[in-house]
Amino acid sequence: MSTKSASAVGRQRRKLSPEFKAKVALAALRQDATIAELSKRFDVHANQIMEGKRRLLERAAGAFCRGAANSSESADLKRLHAKIGKQAIVCSVALIPP
């Protein structure tokens, strides 16, 4: 016998839009209601609210950056391109007959 109730078996996962997630995270940042109240109001779990709030705070500085790439990402990209170039030279030297 299954331990799941009949209502839980037929329920599909909801796909929350990025706009809805942002709305919930901003409401959590305002702190005009508790997480439990927000959870009831938006019909999402409290962990989802806290995760959205954390992600919003982590990525908020990106909204004010000029250009699309983050400086650390562009530095990593330059390093990887340099490594690819070195490996290409090593391979071409190794293929030259003596």
Image (cartoon, rainbow, N blue to C red):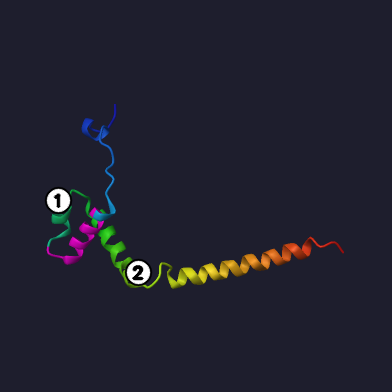
- Looking at the image, residue 80 sits to the left or right of residue 55; the answer is right
What's drawn in magenta, residue-wise? 20-32
Q: Give percent across and percent down for residue 85.
A: 65, 67
- Amino acid at circle 1: Lys
- Magenta-drawn stretch contains 24: yes
Q: Give percent across and percent down for residue 95.
A: 79, 60
Q: Give percent across and percent down for residue 17.
A: 27, 50
Q: Residues within 10 Å of mark 2 (few under 14, many from 20)?
A: few
Residue 62 tag number: 2
Q: Is residue 30 visible?
A: yes
> Looking at this view, is 5 or 85 the one in front?
85
In the image, farthest residue toward the top: 1
Instruction: Identify the residue shown where x is 56% and y is 70%.
Output: 79
Residue 40 tag number: 1
In the image, farthest residue toward the right: 98
- Looking at the image, residue 64 sits to the left or right of residue 98; the answer is left
- Magenta-drawn stretch contains 94: no
Q: Give percent across and percent down for residue 62.
A: 35, 69
Q: Quadrant of residue 47?
A: bottom left
In the displayed structure, 92 sits above or below 9; it is: below
Instruction: Identify the residue shown where x is 12% and y is 61%.
Output: 33
Instruction: Identify the residue shown where x is 29% and y is 29%.
Output: 2
